[in-house]
Image (cartoon, rainbow, N blue to C red):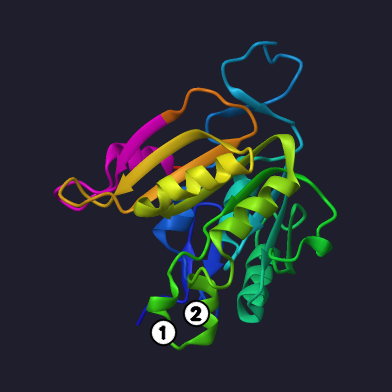
Amino acid sequence: MASPFFRFKQFTIRHDRSAMKVGTDGVLLGAWASQHTEQTSTSTPPHSALHTLPSKLRCLDIGTGTGVIALMLAQRFPSAQIEGIDIDEASLLQAKENVEASRFADRVSIRKADFIDLKSFTNRYNLIVSNPPFYTEETLSGNQTRDKARHTVSLPFEVLIGNAAQLLTEEGLFSVIIPYQSASGFISTCAFHQLYLMRRTDVRSSERKPFKRTLLEFGRNIRPVDASMMTLHNTENQRTAEYAELTKEFYL
């Protein structure tokens, strides 16, 4: 039987009642999003090569599930205010419990909201992240709760991208993890909404496996793309050095 909780270095996630469990995709995104940025300060050079964001970030985690990505962002950005949203009641309750039990409860809020409907959003965000549903109608399981969390019928990519573009600040970043085969179409749709690819990391589980996931980050300005690849496990099924480095502040 799977464990009802997943323990990280600075917080614990219970996921026995959430529609989606803690998984590699969410951890990758939480650790990777906005990684090559710096926050503005008096010491920030005027023409820094890094993308800059305000010192007090406002972040939105779309489809927060257990709240794991929201809590990872809170750990990474000590001055940020993070808002996690979901449409699944059980996931929302568990995410709230996870946040309340953490040291970051004063900076993370969890609420029920459907990202398809923007009327309940009054803020704009410096960082929007999502591990979105990406399975198609052909793979519906019949479990309504799980299907809502996993399938694009609940939040099509076109809607996700278009609404994110409306809520993102001018200097803001939009970061996602999606199937590798969906990347080209996703990038094109973002460009249509004037969100341009800045970073891309293609992910595979081992060197013998094909790429399965892609991490993508977009901004409003066109610039050279920082492209890379990541292999998660070596031939002994241990974390590779690059995967261990990315997640070293989280995994025990």
Instruction: Name the element at disc 1.
Output: loop
Q: Amino acid at mark 2?
A: Arg
Residue 104 coordinates in the image, percent (x, y): 69, 54
Residue 28 coordinates in the image, percent (x, y): 44, 49
For discs 2 and 1, the disc positioned in front in the rendered view = 1
Side of 4 where 77 appears, left or right:
right
Mark 2 vs 1, N-terminal side: 1
Q: Amino acid at mark 1?
A: Ser
Distance between the alpha carbons at the discs numbered 2 and 1: 8 Å
For mark 1, what is the residue? 141
For mark 2, what is the residue? 146
Side of 164 where 156 appears, left or right:
left
Q: Which residues are magenta?
A: 227-247
Question: Looking at the figure, which quarter contains the N terminus?
Answer: bottom left
Residue placed furthest toward the top: 46
Residue 165: which disc? none
Relative to residue 4, is residue 156 depicted above or below? Answer: above
Q: Nearer the viewer, residue 199 or 65?
A: 199
Q: Residue at x 67, y 63 (%)?
A: 99
Residue placed furthest toward the right: 122
Q: In the rendered image, which quarter is residue 154 located in? A: bottom right
Q: In the rendered image, which quarter is residue 43 located in? A: top right
Q: In the rendered image, which quarter is residue 141 located in? A: bottom left
